[in-house]
Structure formats: C-alpha cells, structure tokens
Image: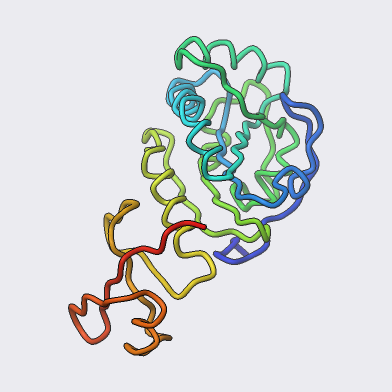
Amino acid sequence: MSLRINDVAPNFTADSTAGKITFHDWIGDGYAILFSHPKDFTPVCTTEFGAVARLVPEFSKRNTKVMGISVDNVDDHTKWKRDIEAFAGTQADFPIIDDTSLTVAKLYNMLPAEAYLPDGRTPADSATVRTVFIIGPDKKIRLTMTYPMSVGRNFAEILRALDAVQATDGVPLATPADWVPGQDVIVALSLDNEAAQAKYGALDIKLPYLRFAKAPAKA
C-alpha cells in the first residue's frame, strides 16, 4: 500500500555522506525534506541537487533539514558532490544517503518489493525514485510530489509548499491556490464566523464556505 499524507514516515538507518544516520533521530524536533534520485552523475539530478545546495539557508530558516537519497554508494556520492558544488557555486551542505540496497526506495513505495539493481544498470532501472517528501516534527508525512525523470523539480515551489504546510500545520487554516507567505489564508469551516473572527480578526467572506483572514504572525 502506498504511503499517504499523515502516515508516519518509515524510519531507517543508512550510511550517508555525513556518516551513519537514523532518520527519525536526524529529523529531531523540526521538519525534514527527503528528496530521491535514481542515480548519481545524471544531468537533471545534478541541477536539482545544485538548487537544493543554494536553498539550504532558506530551509534552515524554516527549521527544516534536507536529505538527498540516491541509489548509489557513499563513495560515488562524495565524488558526485564535487560536480554538484561546481555547478551550484556553493557547498552541498546536506547528507546524501546510500541506498544501493534499495531499502529506503522500497520502504517509501518508490520501487516494487522485487526491484533490484542489475549489472550495467541505467537510471531507467530506478526511474520511479523521483519523489519529494515533506515530513513534520511528529515524523508524519505532510506532502509528497513525484516527478518523471525528464522534468526537473521546481524547488521554489517546494519551498513555497513547505511555507504553506508550516502556516497551516495544526491550526484551522488552509492556503488558497498560488498562495505565498504574506497573503491571506482560508479559515476552516470547523469555526463559525464568530469563532473565526475571535481567533483571526476580520474576515473577508467571499462565499459562505470561503472566508479569508490575515495570516497569523509566526511565533
């Protein structure tokens, strides 16, 4: 069965470019992004890892750690990081885990249980390992995105989605289409108008079931 939103993200222990990591311990009390790749030294993935390298400070501001997964070994990851850093013009300051066993890819339902890495494999053999997971401090999955190999991920959108997840996590709010931080949010129907106004101030009522309010300031 596929992993769903609010499922606990499967825990694992794996070697990485930052040493041995146990995933839930590594997440700690913040958020985490796990983004997966089918092979090292591939063009689209190199641009994606470069994009993440540039955004590490932004993720850190949001109390969010980032981890890459590629189904190659740590030695290859370390060599590949040199290419990533040369392309990005900055350090790739996040761990990349070794998933040559496909343990994580299978735990996260990115590959079928019988999948294996054949001799002389190409990225096509693990093509479906192209998913992003946003995980909350309670270790539950908040959001997933899966891309084909030919489509580079938009990490500005992933950062925007993280902002939306954090803005609505555990509160009766949602974000509308194309929302960015600073814009109004939608108040959940679990609050009537009186309770919504008491909690969030003046409402902009577009429809009886579509009520906007100013986004609360972050604590």
How was the colour assigned to the protein in this rendering? rainbow
For the point 41% across and 71% down, which residue is it? 173
Q: Give the number of marks.
A: 0
- Give above or below for 136 relative to 69: below
- Residue 8 location (% of width, % of height): 68, 62
- Give above or below for 211 relative to 141: below
For the point 47% across and 23% down, which residue is it? 50
- Residue 164 location (% of width, % of height): 42, 56
Residue 195 as seen in the image, left or right of residue 102: left
Q: Nearer the viewer, residue 111 or 120?
A: 111
Q: Say which quarter of the image contains residue 147.
A: top left
Q: Nearer the viewer, residue 73 or 51?
A: 51
List the single residue furthest toward the left: 206
Query: Quick one: quadrant of the N terminus?
Result: bottom right
- Give above or below for 81 relative to 188: above
- Give above or below for 155 relative to 191: above
- Residue 23 location (% of width, % of height): 74, 45
Residue 1 as seen in the image, left or right of residue 153: right
Q: Nearer the viewer, residue 25 or 128?
A: 25
Q: Say which quarter of the image contains residue 184.
A: bottom left
For the point 75% across and 50% down, which residue is it? 24
Q: Nearer the viewer, residue 173 or 35?
A: 173
- Residue 56 location (% of width, % of height): 53, 31
For the point 37% across and 84% down, which residue is it? 189
